Image: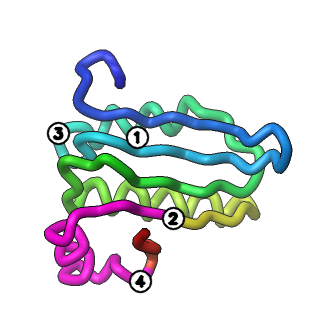
Amino acid sequence: MNNDESYQVMLEVDSATKMQNLIFEGELGIANAEAIKQRLLSMDFSGDVTIKIRNVETLDLSGLQLVYSFIKTLHSKGYKASIESDLSDRMKESLLNTGFSEFVKHN
């Protein structure tokens, strides 16, 4: 986890396929949105990205907007992005209520 231990943002690259996996875990809410944004800006993306949202304790509209904005940025650079998630039923319901459910594939 990061310095305050409440969230984690990691970039893993599959050596065989060169696919980049961006992993989000922990508290993905307004309290960490700016720090997560800065972490994303410090990373070097060189191709398509699979975003994996897992072990999430908090995911609010700020966190969703941040992920959505990141995907738009990737698309503007010509990269593809997909999202895989392992969310609680409560969080899936929140996605449905906010209109973000269609852009997140649930496991």
| Residue 61 image position (x, y, % from top left) | 22, 63
| Span shown in magenta | 83-102
Towards the viewer: 105 or 44: 105
Q: Distance between the residues labelled 4 and 1?
A: 23 Å
Q: Distance between the residues labelled 4 and 3?
A: 25 Å
Mark 3, secondary structure of its residue: loop
The residue beneath circle 4 is 102
Q: How far apart are marks 4 and 2 (CA)?
A: 10 Å
Is 81 included in the stretch rendered in magenta? no
Mark 1 in CB contact with mark 3 (< 8 angstroms): no
The residue beneath circle 1 is 37
With 18 as the anchor, is 52 left or right in this view? Answer: left
Mark 4 in CB contact with mark 3 (< 8 angstroms): no
Figure colour scheme: rainbow
The residue beneath circle 3 is 31
Q: Distance between the residues labelled 2 and 3?
A: 22 Å
